[in-house]
Image (cartoon, rainbow, N blue to C red):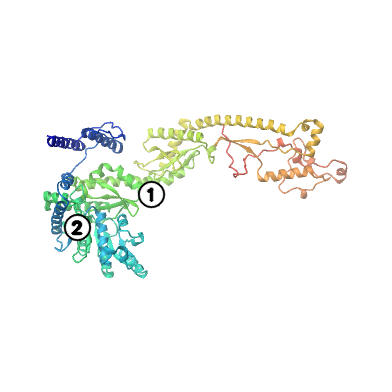
Amino acid sequence: AMEEEDLSMQIGWNQLFQQFVSDLFVDTEERNAPVVTIDNLDKSGRGIGNVLHTLSQAVDFVRTKYARRFSPAQLPETNHLSVLAEGLALYLNSALSTPQYEALSAQLSAAAIHWLKSFMRLDPNTRGSFTRDEGTGRQFACRVALHNKFPNYEELGYQALTGQPIFYYTSSFMSESFHALGLPSSSFRQITSSEQLEKFIVEDQAQERVPVMILACVGSGVTEQLSELRAVSQKHGLLMHAEGDDLAMLLTKDPPKFLQTILSCECFTISPGEWYGLASSSTCTFLKSGLQTVRTEKEKMFALPLWLTMQYVGQDRLISIISKARVLSREMVKLLSNSPSVITHSSQNSLSVLFRYEPVTKPARLFHKDFLNSLNSQVLIDLSETAVLLHLDMMLLENCNCMRFRPLFAPELSNIEPSDVRAFVDRLGRAIECINATLSCAPDFEEEAQTHQGLQCVHVRNFVGIGAVRYLPNFLRGVNLAPEVSQEVDAVNSLLAKELAKQDVLFSEGTTTEGKICVCLGVETKTIDNNSPVHYTCAITEKIEELGLRRKIEEKFGEILAQGIQAAEKHMKVENELAEVQQGIFRSIPVVGSMVNWWSPVEKKVHGKSFDIGSTALRNVVLSPSAQKKAEGRTSSESAPSTPSRTSSESSVGEELTPIRGASVEAVAPPSPSISEKSEPLEPIEARISDSDQPSPIIPVTDDEPDLPKPEPLPLD
């Protein structure tokens, strides 16, 4: 009874899982999915139905958040078959003992390898081995090379090395799998041509290093000189390993001639699972007869999905899939070659087409690599309507984003026609034309915007468009704005961007590299002429006048200025009261106070206040260094004995004598000797002017920080 109950429960599970999978690929109803929270585990457990319902909510949430829409998922029949095979492998692992499971896996692998060798017309003595993925297959090939170069490497490890082994590879993505070999990073050197390979080999041999293997990727977009690389490897006794999408053409009846070099390599890796559209890669590495092999992973039914699919699909259907992908790739390369702004990194014989858009402007401009990477990503997103059907994606090639067309791996290859490729290239050409014209207009727009007061050209990281400006009145230029002041300016620019966007989709709100709000002008889809920069700037300035943005900022800063003046008066009043207390009572007596002040002048300790409307800060106003020297000179002249007369040569350099108001010019002329003997000594003009009449310096200076720039006065017109 217990066994029957367990069997009934498992059948119920099967039905629940089948319903879940069906909903996963069929249900497209849009709904507000809740966030899946992490709760504590129930001590008594939960039913599978409730668990699958929680998982369904998690799927709905990620679909809604990251795709912004629900779209029906596609599951090719071969992919579905491989999913079932993966589950079947787990069932077999549970039902069979370990020896039985490994023996069955070895038989299935041997059958699949035999079929692949027959398809590619390989030597019957060629050995094959299934691995988890391409990275594992690459590591297996490197270990084989080390074992053949250093015979005892598998047993002794690094002790068997007679010198540092060196591997040469053509694609940067290969480096990720080298870490598992336990060798230093200096043992792996990337190459781009056969000439560079020859140079590196000579250098390494001169430093008593041991070149071991060349790893080449066919169809990755890197310069592929297979025949030249193979000649260099044979010249210096190096093993050569090849991999890549283009190896699929070895299964066709008429493979390209350049692939014949692959058959002479010591080893190569293919991924037939991807060619069939399987969920698992089913990677297989072939070794040339005569090579000493090494231990591989234990048999884990890696070949089961491929074994099932190859029998279901057959050879003719696979060859037709590869042939159609080859036709589509040729059409893409042919059409892209007509555009001077597109750089193609693949040949017409390649199954994968890699291309990159680089703008061509008049006059010519140089663009940063990060900008070009962002530009290519944005172009692919904008063309997603046609790019999704072709299964285009982005690939990093030598640290540069490239668009990649891989028809062999498209889930709907049977529905893709050459007309779809032409439609995509046509839309790409129109987008390139608009972007080229937009980027050509950008320098003229920046020059025109700088002629308008209040417009400030700013930089938005990796922004594709005519440019970006920020409205900032002139009286705030060069001022360190306080947070509340900066927020007010950001609010004004945000309002400006939103109002401009209502009249033209060209305008949008953006954020500068410093985190400030600005107005962005994107890609212009209309015709651009010489008057376009003037038209754009006039539209912005007219909207500024219409919204009265300058008046709003002035009103805001008028309030801030009034508050600053009140604060300055309050601080000065408190400091004056403290200064009077410090001077003492003797200085307040009329006659005695004059004698005390003459004998011991009071140093002015109450400074004026400077209010910065930008930072809303109060600072003491002190003399600049040059003014302090003049003040010291005046103090010394007051305390020193006066001479009867003073000539112009005795006056200090740079000192100006300003006539006293109401006096004639003759009043300050040097007196005659006779008069000077009877008259009082002539007091310097500066000494006659009280401290309150002296012009106070505007630049606030402290001991710890340099002088700040003089803020411009607040316009009140």
Does residue 372 appear in this view?
yes
Vertical placement of residue 688 versus 199, above or below = above
Checking the image for residue 78, the label placed there is none
Looking at marks 2 and 1 on the same chain, the residue that comes earlier in the sequence is marked by 2
* On-image quarter of the C terminus: top right
Quadrant of residue 635 within the rendered picture? top right
Quadrant of residue 603 within the rendered picture? top right
Q: Callout 2 environment at 10 Å: few (<14), some (14 to 19), or many (20+)?
A: many
Give the labeled residue for mark 2.
Answer: 129
User: Regarding mark 2 in the picture, which secondary structure is present there?
Assistant: strand
Give the labeled residue for mark 1.
Answer: 370
Residue 67, position in %: x, y? 29, 38
Measure the alpha-carbon separation of dots 2 and 1. 41 Å
Does residue 79 appear in this view?
no
User: Regarding mark 1 in the picture, which secondary structure is present there?
Assistant: helix
Q: Nearer the viewer, mark 2 or mark 1?
A: 2
State the residue at coordinates (28%, 43%): 383
Vertical placement of residue 245 versus 593, above or below = below
Q: Callout 1 environment at 10 Å: few (<14), some (14 to 19), or many (20+)?
A: few
Vertical placement of residue 50 versus 166, above or below = above
Residue 552, position in %: x, y? 50, 30
Q: Is residue 443 left or right of residue 584?
A: left
Residue kind at label 2, given as amino acid type: Ser
Asked if labels 1 and 2 touch by Cβ distance under 8 angstroms, the answer is: no
Residue 530, position in %: x, y? 41, 44
